[in-house]
Amino acid sequence: MNFGGLWAVKDVDFFIGTGEVVGLIGPNGSGKTTFLNIISGLYRATDGVVTLQGEDITGLRPFEIFKKGVARTYQSSRLCWDLSVADNILMGLHTKQKASFLDVLFRPKKANDEIYGYLQECMDVLSCFNPALFNRRYDLARDIPHIDRRRVEISRALVGRPALLLLDEPTAGLNDEETAQMMGDIRKIKEKIKDICIIIIEHDMKVMERVTERVVVFNAGRKIAEGAYRDVIRDKNVIGAYLGGGLHG
Ligand SMILES: Nc1ncnc2c1ncn2[C@@H]1O[C@H](COP(=O)(O)OP(=O)(O)OP(=O)(O)O)[C@@H](O)[C@H]1O
Ligand SMILES: [Mg+2]
C-alpha cells in the first residue's frame, strides 16, 4: 500500500489458518491498521493479492468482503451512541436482510419475523459472549462502560458468523483488570467458535502471550519477524525496532 510515495505496507507475506489466532505487533505507524484496512477492503492495495479460503477477494468493496466472511472492529470505537446495545449489534446483520421495502409495507409480518429472527441471533451471541451485558441489551451505547462498548463492537462483528475476525487494538483505553477480562472474552470466542480465525493487533504484550498462537511483527511497513511470542520477543530485529519504543514482555 503506497500513500503518495510512502510504502505503508510492503512485501508482506501473511497467512492465517482456520482456528488460528495470530497477533500483529509493531511500533506506532508500522502499517498494522493499514494491513487490516487492505484485507477488509477499506483500502485498495497498490499491489498484491488477498485470498480468502482460496478465493481472490482483492479489490472487492468492504461490504462484499464482509459478506464473504471477514468482519472487523476498529482502533477507535465506532458505535451509534443513541442506539441500544441490541440495535448496534443488529447492524452487523443488515447485509443479510432479505425483506424488501415492499415487504415492509405490504407483508409486514414477513419482514417482522425476519427481524425478530436476527434479533434472536444477536442475543444468542451477546449472551454466550458476555451474559452480564445481555442484561443491559436495551441500554444506549452511550450509557455503558468503555469495556462493554468494545464487547458490543466485537459482538456486532461476530453476529454475521465470520470466517475471519480482525480486531484492531481491542484493549485500547482499558485498565489492567479490564484488559484481563477482555483477554478472557477473546479466549471464549476461540473456544466457542472453533473454526473462526482471528488477527489481533495489540500493544499489550500480555495479551499477545496469552491469546495468540503466533505473532507477526511489522516495522516500517515490512514483516520483520514471525513465530511464537516467546521467540519473537527475543529476536534482535524486533528488539531493535522497539528500542526506545517500549516492548513490555
Ligand atoms: N489514509 C492514509 N493516507 C496517508 N497515509 C496513511 C493513511 N493511512 C495510514 N497512513 C500512513 O501509513 C503508515 C502506517 O499507518 P498505520 O495506521 O497503518 O500504522 P499502525 O501500525 O496501525 O500504527 P498505530 O500503532 O499507531 O495504530 C503511517 O505512516 C501513516 O501515517
Ligand atoms: Mg493502528
Image (spheres, helix red, strand yellow):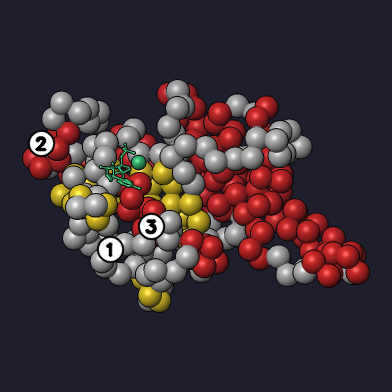
In the rendered image of this protein, does residue 131 appear above or below residue 121? Answer: above
Binning the other alpha carbons within 10 Å of mark 2 as few (below 14), some (14 to 19) or many (20 upward) gives: few
Disc 3 to disc 1, C-alpha distance: 9 Å
The x, y position of residue 136, in whole percent, is 72, 34
> Which is in the foreground here, disc 3 or disc 2?
3
In the rendered image of this protein, does residue 249 appear above or below residue 96? Answer: above
In the rendered image of this protein, does residue 200 appear above or below residue 109? Answer: above
Disc 3 residue: CB within 8 Å of ligand 1: yes
For marks 3 and 2 on the same chain, the one whose residue lies earlier in the sequence: 3
Q: To which residue does mark 1 refer?
A: 46
Q: Residue at x 71, y 39 (%)?
A: 83
SS assignment at label 3 = loop
Q: Residue at x 32, y 35 (%)?
A: 203
The x, y position of residue 101, in whole percent, is 80, 66
For marks 1 and 2 on the same chain, the one whose residue lies earlier in the sequence: 1
- Would residue 120 be found to the left or right of residue 246 on screen? right
> Which is in the foreground here, disc 1 or disc 2?
1
Q: Amino acid at mark 2?
A: Gly
Residue 170 placement: quadrant: top left
The x, y position of residue 27, in whole percent, is 24, 37
Q: Residue at x 33, y 50 (%)?
A: 34
In the rendered image of this protein, does residue 200 appear above or below residue 178? Answer: below
Binning the other alpha carbons within 10 Å of mark 3 as few (below 14), some (14 to 19) or many (20 upward) gives: some
SS assignment at label 1 = loop
Q: To which residue does mark 3 refer?
A: 43
SS assignment at label 2 = helix
- Would residue 120 be found to the left or right of residue 71 on screen? right
Disc 1 to disc 2, C-alpha distance: 28 Å
Report ligand 1 position as a quadrant.
top left
Q: To which residue does mark 2 refer?
A: 240
Disc 2 residue: CB within 8 Å of ligand 1: no
Disc 3 to disc 2, C-alpha distance: 29 Å
